[in-house]
Amino acid sequence: MSKQINVHPVDIYSILTFYSQFYTEPRGKNIIKVCMGTACHVMGASEIFDYISKKLNITDGQTTKDNKFTLEKVMCLGCCGMAPVITVNENFYGRCQLEKANKILKELQTGDMK
């Protein structure tokens, strides 16, 4: 690509790694984002992230070996009144506690997600 557009590879890489919307590794079918903004953090988002991380055996920015899940921490999803919040792909789950996170994971793993 760098030869085609006459740009040094390092310049392409610096842009690729600067923006959080670009990825250098394949992402999972289901992208799980856990909001770590102030309201979500105060309401237990760290515990939810740790729980999901342990269940999937991955951490921030990683994808499961079967490419089903990618887990990410995000700084704000813009719905603080529903804290703590997670998203799975484009679906928002507010007031998410460990039980709800567990239910969501089970539904995703079994293909029963509505």
Image (cartoon, grey):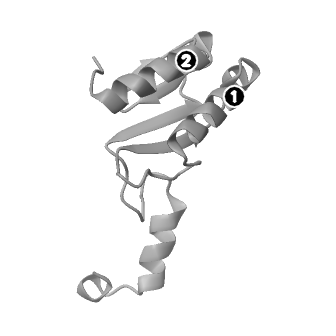
Q: Residue at x 27, y 81 (%)?
A: 1
**Residue indicated by mark 1:** 47
Q: Secondary structure at mark 1?
A: helix
Crowd around label 1: few <14 · some 14–19 · many ≥20 (10 Å): few
**Side (left or right) of 39 relative to 27:** right
Where, by quadrant of the figure, is residue 98 drawn? Answer: top right
Mark 2 falls on what kind of element?
loop
Q: Is residue 95 left or right of residue 91?
A: right
Q: What's under tag 2, amino acid-wise? A: Cys
The Cα–Cα distance between marks 1 and 2, rounded to whole angstroms, is 19 Å
Query: Would you say the residues marked 1 and 2 are in contact, meaning their CB atoms lie under 8 Å apart?
Result: no
Residue at position x 55%, y 23% in the image? 78
Residue drawn at x 58%, y 40% as measured from the top left: 53
The residue carrying mark 2 is: 79
**Left or right: 16 as drawn, with respect to 96:** left
Look at the image and tell me in which quarter the C terminus lies: top left
Q: Nearer the viewer, residue 9 or 56?
A: 56
Vertical side of 47 occupied by 83: above or below: above
Specify the quadrant of the image occupied by residue 99.
top right
The kind of residue on which mark 1 rests is: Glu
